[in-house]
Amino acid sequence: MDYDDMLDRALDETPDIDGDSERFDVPDPNVRQEGNVTVYENFQATVDRLGREEDHVMKFLQNEVGTSGHIDESGRARLTGSFSKRRISEALDAYVEEFVLCSECGLPDTKLVREQGAILLQCEACGARSATSS
């Protein structure tokens, strides 16, 4: 068996990775004002799509927009203050960049793992591991 045959065989046996991050889209935030509170209606759907714990996403959102808030019994995020859809969307983009997309291959096939007190982003597609800010 020569090199080209072995290469062809290896490529045939390698699983396909649907290799572009375009397949990963975060739902646009559906937000509305309710008095002095911004209600993020589709927060639960967004968290499900991200594959992350709702408390982790909520804590990040609160830090990004500089407010307090909570998740209500219906799975909506309720943030104290008035925030535009654009502001929430920018905060979500920052979350995805930091805690979802692999810094090496750009795919969303990642999980958060805790190791010696640090949270690492581990990619299931390429195997890369990278530190996160929190």
Image (cartoon, rainbow, N blue to C red):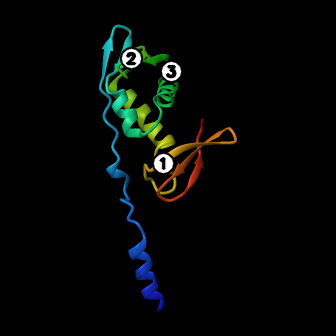
Q: Earlier in the sequence, mark 2 or mark 1?
A: 2
Mark 1 vs mark 3, foreground winner is 1
**Crowd around label 2: few <14 · some 14–19 · many ≥20 (10 Å):** few
Alpha carbons under labels 2 and 3: distance apart: 23 Å
Residue at the spot of label 2? 73
Alpha carbons under labels 1 and 3: distance apart: 27 Å
Percent coordinates x, y for residue 87 in the rendering: 39, 27
**Crowd around label 1: few <14 · some 14–19 · many ≥20 (10 Å):** many
Q: Nearer the viewer, residue 15 or 132?
A: 15
Q: Residue at x 33, y 51 (%)?
A: 22
Q: Residue at x 42, y 80 (%)?
A: 9
Q: Quadrant of the C terminus?
A: top right
At label 1, the amino acid type is: Thr
Percent coordinates x, y for residue 101 in the rendering: 46, 47
Quarter of image, res 47? top left
Residue at the spot of label 3? 66
Mark 2 vs mark 3, foreground winner is 2
Residue 4 left/right relative to 34:
right
Numbered circle sitting on residue 110: 1
At label 2, the amino acid type is: Glu
